[in-house]
Image (spheres, rainbow, N blue to C red):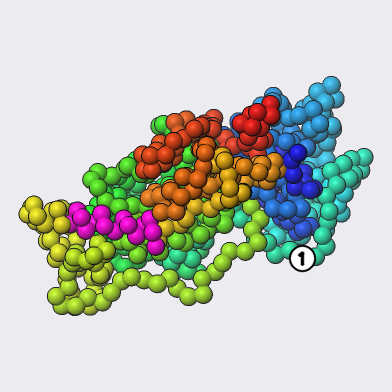
C-alpha cells in the first residue's frame, strides 16, 4: 500500500533553450498557487544559450510536494526533439500534447496547434500563455488565477492583455479535455511565497546579517550573487564581482577582518581555487562563509546538472589542520535556516563554514508557507579592543576576543605565518603547539552548542536506518510516507561535518544502515565510517546528473524488503 498526495498532477514541458520554459513554469506555478495548490517545479536544461532540448517538470497537489516524480500525467511538447528525448520517461497513461505541425496523431500526440493559435494571439512569443490556458482547462478551472499570475509577471498593460487573450485561446481549444485532470480550486487568497532555491539561500544570508558578497560567476552558484545584488540597495550589501575565485575568497576574508559579514559564492570548479584562501582564514582564525553549489565534475563535467560530488573537497580542501563546518540543506526551508545559521556559526567559532547546495536545489521552484524573519539584527561577536589587546590570547575554548581595526585602542594584528598571542610571526616550537591546540579546540563548538542536529523521520524503534544529506532528504521522506514501513526510518543530516554529537546514538540503534547519495563513490558514507567506525550495510548511489525521484527510492525500498 502507498499513500500518495490525495490529489495531484505531474506536468512536463519539453522544448528548446530560448523557448521560455522557465517563464512558462513560473507563470503556471503562480496560477496554481493562486488557486490554492502546492507547487514544485524542477528545471532541466542543457549548457547552451539556444537549441538543445530542455524540460521542466511541475508538480501540483493539494498537499506540499518537495520531490521529483517519474510519473508524468501530461507532457506538452514544444519542439520536435522533445519527444525522442523524453519518451523513456513517459508512461502508457501519459497524455502527450503537441503541435500537429510537428507531430502526427500516429505518434499518440493530442493536437494543440500552437503555431496557428500564436498567429491569432499576435506572435510566437505568446505560445506559452496559450499552453497555460490549455492546462487550466484540463484542471477544470476558469482563467481568473492565470490572469492574476500574468498581471504579476508582466508590468505593461498591453502585454498583459495580449497574454490574457492568448491564454483564452488555449483555454477554449481544450474544451474536449476539460476536467481531464481535475484538481480543487480554492477561491480564497493564498499568500505562500514562490521562490527558487537561489533566492532562498540569498534571503537566508540576509537574515544572517550578510552585508558583503564577493563572487566570480559560475553556474549554478550565480543565482545567489544575482539575488543578493537585487537586494543590495535595500539591505546595505556591498556586491563585488571579482576577477576570479582567488580574488573573491580573499575579498571575503578581508571583509570579515574589517568587521563585515561576508559571503563567497561559487561552484566546485571555483572552490578548487579557494583552498589557499580557506587555509588562510583557518590560521587567521577569521570567520568565513563560502557557498558551494555542486554540479557534476570532474572538469566542466555537466555544468547545468546536479550531483553531490563535492563533499570531500569541502571537507579536505586547504592545507594544514583547522576546524571548519559543512552545512548541506535539503529543502528550501533548510536552505534558509542553514544560510542564516552559517553566519552565526562562523562568527561564534571564528572558523570557516561551508554551505553545500546543488543545482537541483538551487534551480527548483517551491511554494513556501513562510520564512521566519529575525526580530533583531544578528548578534556580533566583535569587541572593542583594549590598549594591551592580544588577538590570539589563550582561552579554554580556543576562542579569543575578536577585534577589528579602528574599534578600540588595540592593534589587531593577523598573519598567514604561525604567530604568538599578539599575532606576530614566530617559529618557537612550544608556541606552535599551543596555537595548533588553540585552533583545534574551537572545533568542539561546531559539534555541540553551534551544531545543527540531524532529524529523524519515521519510527523511533527502527531496524533499518536510511541516511540522507542535502537534497536527497525530502525525496526519501515522501517515499517513506507513501510506503509507511514500520521498521524503516530516515536520519536526515543538514550538518555533515563535524558530525553533531547526537549522531552516534542514532547509528548505534540501527541494525542496518543505508546511505543515499547523488555521487558515485559514497562520500558521506565514507565520512561516517571514518568518523564513527559504524558499518554501512548498503549504499544507494545515483550520478547521471539527475536527482533521485520518489519512485526510484520506493523501488529500492521494496527491493530491500523483498517485495519485488
Residue positioned 48% across, 75% down in the render: 376
* Whole-percent x, y for residue 66 in the image: 64, 48
Question: Split into 4 quadrants, where in the image is the C terminus?
Answer: top right
Is 371 on the left or on the right of 328, as rendered? right
Magenta span covers which residues? 435-449
As drawn, 515 above or below 204: above
Residue positioned 54% across, 32% down in the render: 540
Residue positioned 79% across, 48% down in the render: 6
Is 436 on the left or on the right of 7, as rendered? left
Is 192 on the left or on the right of 318, as rendered? right
Residue positioned 78% across, 55% down in the render: 146
* Whole-percent x, y for residue 240 in the image: 39, 57
Magenta stretch mostly in which secondary structure? helix
The stretch drawn in magenta includes residue 436? yes
* Whole-percent x, y for residue 23 in the image: 66, 48
Is 533 on the left or on the right of 494, as rendered? left
Amino acid at each position: 500500500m502507498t499513500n500518495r498526495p490525495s490529489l495531484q498532477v505531474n506536468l512536463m514541458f519539453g522544448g528548446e533553450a530560448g523557448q521560455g520554459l522557465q517563464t512558462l513554469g513560473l507563470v503556471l506555478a503562480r496560477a496554481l498557487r493562486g488557486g490554492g495548490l502546492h507547487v514544485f517545479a524542477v528545471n532541466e536544461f542543457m549548457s547552451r544559450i539556444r537549441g538543445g532540448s530542455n524540460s521542466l517538470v511541475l508538480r501540483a497537489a493539494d498537499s506540499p510536494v518537495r520531490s521529483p516524480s517519474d510519473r508524468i500525467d501530461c507532457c506538452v511538447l514544444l519542439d520536435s526533439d522533445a519527444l525522442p528525448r523524453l519518451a523513456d520517461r513517459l508512461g502508457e497513461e501519459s497524455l502527450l500534447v503537441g503541435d500537429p505541425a510537428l507531430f502526427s496523431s500516429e505518434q499518440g500526440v493530442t493536437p494543440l496547434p500552437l503555431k496557428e493559435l500564436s498567429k491569432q494571439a499576435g506572435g510566437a512569443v505568446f505560445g506559452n500563455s496559450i499552453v497555460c490556458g490549455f492546462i487550466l482547462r484540463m484542471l477544470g478551472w476558469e482563467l481568473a488565477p492565470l490572469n492574476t499570475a500574468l498581471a504579476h509577471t508582466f508590468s505593461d498593460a498591453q502585454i498583459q492583455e495580449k497574454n490574457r487573450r492568448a491564454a483564452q485561446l488555449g483555454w477554449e481549444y481544450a474544451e474536449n479535455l476539460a476536467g481531464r485532470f481535475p484538481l480543487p480550486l480554492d477561491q480564497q487568497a493564498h499568500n505562500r511565497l514562490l521562490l527558487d532555491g537561489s533566492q532562498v539561500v540569498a534571503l537566508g544570508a540576509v537574515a544572517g546579517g550578510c552585508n558583503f558578497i564577493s563572487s566570480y560567476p559560475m553556474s549554478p552558484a550565480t543565482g545567489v550573487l544575482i539575488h543578493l545584488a537585487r537586494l543590495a540597495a535595500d539591505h546595505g550589501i556591498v556586491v563585488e564581482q571579482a576577477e576570479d575565485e582567488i580574488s573573491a575568497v580573499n575579498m571575503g576574508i578581508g571583509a570579515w577582518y574589517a568587521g563585515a559579514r561576508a559571503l563567497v559564492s561559487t561552484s566546485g570548479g571555483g572552490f578548487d581555487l579557494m583552498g589557499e584562501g580557506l587555509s588562510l582564514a583557518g590560521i587567521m582564525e577569521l570567520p568565513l562563509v563560502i557557498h558551494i553549489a555542486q554540479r557534476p565534475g570532474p572538469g566542466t563535467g555537466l555544468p547545468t546538472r546536479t550531483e553531490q560530488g563535492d563533499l570531500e573537497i569541502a571537507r579536505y580542501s586547504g592545507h594544514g589542520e583547522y576546524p571548519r563546518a559543512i552545512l548541506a540543506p535539503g529543502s528550501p526551508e533548510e536552505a534558509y535556516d542553514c544560510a542564516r545559521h552559517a553566519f552565526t556559526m562562523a562568527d561564534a567559532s571564528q572558523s570557516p563554514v561551508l554551505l553545500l547546495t546543488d543545482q537541483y536545489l538551487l534551480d527548483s521552484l517551491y511554494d513556501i508557507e513562510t520564512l521566519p524573519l529575525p526580530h533583531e539584527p544578528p548578534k556580533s561577536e566583535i569587541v572593542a579592543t583594549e590598549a594591551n589587546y592580544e588577538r590570539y590570547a589563550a582561552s579554554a575554548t580556543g576562542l579569543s576576543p575578536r577585534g577589528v581595526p579602528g574599534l578600540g585602542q588595540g592593534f589587531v594584528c593577523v598573519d598567514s605565518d604561525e604567530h604568538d598571542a599578539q599575532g606576530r610571526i614566530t617559529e618557537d616550537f612550544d608556541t606552535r603547539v599551543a596555537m595548533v591546540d588553540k585552533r583545534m579546540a574551537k572545533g568542539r563548538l561546531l559539534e555541540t552548542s553551534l551544531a545543527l542536529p540531524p532529524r529523524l523521520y519515521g519510527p523511533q524503534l527502527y531496524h533499518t536506518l536510511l541516511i540522507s544529506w542535502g537534497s536527497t532528504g525530502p525525496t526519501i521522506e515522501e517515499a517513506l510516507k507513501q510506503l509507511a514501513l514500520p521498521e524503516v526510518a530516515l536520519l536526515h543530516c543538514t550538518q555533515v561535518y563535524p558530525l553533531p554529537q547526537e549522531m552516534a546514538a542514532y547509528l548505534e540503534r540501527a541494525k542496518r544502515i543505508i546511505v543515499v547519495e547523488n555521487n558515485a563513490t559514497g562520500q558521506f558514507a565514507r565520512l561516517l565510517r571514518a568518523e564513527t567506525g559504524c558499518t554501512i550495510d548498503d549504499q544507494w548511489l545515483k550520478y547521471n546528473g539527475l536527482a533521485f525521484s520518489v519512485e526510484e527510492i520506493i523501488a529500492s525500498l521494496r527491493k530491500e524488503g523483498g517485495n519485488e
